Amino acid sequence: MAVSRASASPPLLRPPAPPAFVRAQRRSLTRRQHALLRQSVDKASLDPSNPLQMGARELCHAAMNASKQGYADMHFWRRLADQGKRLAGSLAPREVSLLLSSLARIA
C-alpha cells in the first residue's frame, strides 16, 4: 500500500504561543489599564502650582502615550517606574500616590 506524498507531510500548524515570561516582558498597558490611568489622571485633583503633582501628571501621560505607540523598551519603563516611585513617596494626595504606584507595578 503506497502512501501519497501529500498525506505524509505534517499538517500545517500555527506557531506556538510565546511562553508566559515573553508575554510578561511586553511593557505596554492593556486597554483597561490605559482607561483606568486616563480616568484617574482626569479625576485627580491636582494643584497646577505644585510641580510634583504636575510631574506626576506628565509621567502618567508619558506612560499612556508610550503604550499607545507600542513602545516596548524595558529601560524606558523601568525609568518611568523609578520616577513614579520617587514621586509617589513625596506626594500628599492619595489619588496621585495610588495612581503612580499602580503605574510602577505595571512597569
Image (cartoon, rainbow, N blue to C red):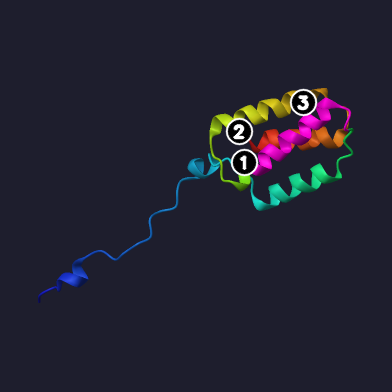
Q: Reply above or below: 34 against 8.
A: above
Task: Give the label, 1 or 3, closer to the camera.
Answer: 1
- N-term mark: 1 or 3: 1
Examine the structure image and report whether residue 64 is included in the region drawn in magenta.
yes
User: What SS does tag 2 mark?
Assistant: helix
User: What SS does tag 1 mark?
Assistant: helix
Q: Reply above or below: 31 against 73.
A: below
- Direction from residue 1 to residue 66 in the image, left or right: right
Q: Residue 77 carries which label?
A: 2
Depth check, front residue: 24 or 84: 84
| Residue labelled with disc 3 | 87
Image quadrant assignment for residue 58: top right
Three-letter code for the amino acid on which mark 2 is drawn: Trp
User: Whole-Å distance between the Cαs marked 1 and 3?
Assistant: 19 Å
* Cβ–Cβ under 8 Å for marks 1 and 2: yes
- N-term mark: 3 or 2: 2
Q: In the rendered structure, which segment of residues is drawn in magenta?
A: 48-66
